[in-house]
């Protein structure tokens, strides 16, 4: 198995005639850590500093859900169906117990997987996300469009505005993060997400906000680490506080001077906290 995410080849597994693309890195054995990614993301959008940091101790797997990146099929427009596809992927590669790291939309998917299949999930890390009914998801499309416009006007990447605070420190961290994303040495870059998939994901986020009952979280008895930046404009940070309150067995960590991508800005701290949390 590769020792660095940037050197990890992409492979696929067939699920009822649909290929699902994934990469794995790290130490085999033990409970694998599976990453569930955010709106617009493909495999190349995971920070190698985070993946490699966790892979120093764990077997780490990242995959494209249905219709995203190198995976086939059509992207669902609701989180429930995304969770079903995630479970199908985990079963297809032979996993019966996992730790989930869900970021943003992926954190919502992780919550549903834990509720539907508690036997499958040992621990959860929920980053930059919120409970059903939490505020912000319905506005994701507008926030994304605004960031794209700002980025075009200023010659920057949209993630400068979506994931990071406007302070010099946070913007410098954005530059470093984007540099790490460009470090892949293999030629098999993932397929960019399509506008159709983005539309379905934006719809799923809006439906999640319209959800009126996060009561199912009371059944999630697994330990959960909830993390976020202190100035999240994608899914406002208050959602993380509410999520930690709704979950029976949660701990909360809020990173300073950072936004939606606080786990990438404070990657060393996030890796340290997550490894400590997952060791038990």
Image (cartoon, rainbow, N blue to C red):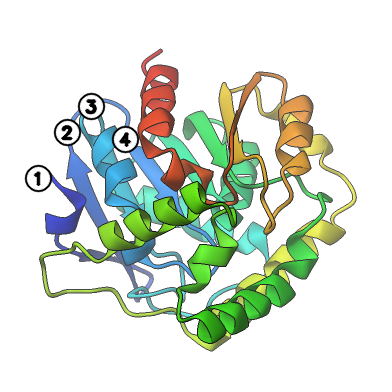
The residue that appears at 31% across and 35% down in the rendered structure is 32
User: Which residue carries the number 1 mark?
Assistant: 1
Residue at the far right: name it.
212
Q: Is residue 193 above or below residue 183?
A: below
Q: Quadrant of the C terminus?
A: top left
Report x, y in % for residue 234: 67, 59
Q: Position of residue 242 (x, y in %)?
A: 79, 34
Dot placed on the residue nearer the N-terminal end, 3 or 4: 4
- Which residue is found at the position 16% from the left and 33% from the top? 28
Label placed on residue 32 = 4
Q: Nearer the viewer, mark 2 or mark 3?
A: 3
Q: Is residue 63 visible?
A: no
Q: Please say if the residues under marks 2 and 1 sit with CB atoms less than 8 Å apart.
A: yes
Q: Secondary structure at mark 2?
A: loop
**Residue hosting label 2:** 28
Circle 3 sits on which residue? Answer: 57
- The residue lying toward the viewer, choosing from 277 and 234, is 234
């Amino acid at each position: 198995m590769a020792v660095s995410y940037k050197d990890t080849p992409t492979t696929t597994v067939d699920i009822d005639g649909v290929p699902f693309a994934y990469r794995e890195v790290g130490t085999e054995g033990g409970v694998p850590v599976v990453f569930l990614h955010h709106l617009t993301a493909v495999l190349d959008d995971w920070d190698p500093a985070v993946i490699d940091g966790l892979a120093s101790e764990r077997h780490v797997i990242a995959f494209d859900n249905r219709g995203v990146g190198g995976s086939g099929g059509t992207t669902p427009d609701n989180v429930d169906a995304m969770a079903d596809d995630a479970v199908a992927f985990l079963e297809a590669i032979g996993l019966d117990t996992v730790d989930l790291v869900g970021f943003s939309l992926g954190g919502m998917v992780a919550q549903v997987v834990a509720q539907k299949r508690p036997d499958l999930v040992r621990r959860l890390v929920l980053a930059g996300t919120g409970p059903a009914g939490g505020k912000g998801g319905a506005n994701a499309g507008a926030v994304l469009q605004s960031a794209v416009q700002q980025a075009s006007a200023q010659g920057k990447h949209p993630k400068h505005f979506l994931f990071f605070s406007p302070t010099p420190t946070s913007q410098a961290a954005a530059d470093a993060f984007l540099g790490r994303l460009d470090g892949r040495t293999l030629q098999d870059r993932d397929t960019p997400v399509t506008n159709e998939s983005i539309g379905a994901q934006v719809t799923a986020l809006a439906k999640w906000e319209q959800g009126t009952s996060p009561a199912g979280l009371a059944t999630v008895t697994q330990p959960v680490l909830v993390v976020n930046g202190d100035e999240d404009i994608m899914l406002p940070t208050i959602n993380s506080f509410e999520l930690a309150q709704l979950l029976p067995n949660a701990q909360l960590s809020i990173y300073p001077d950072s936004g939606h991508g606080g786990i990438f800005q404070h990657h060393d701290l996030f890796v340290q906290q997550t490894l400590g949390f997952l060791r038990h």
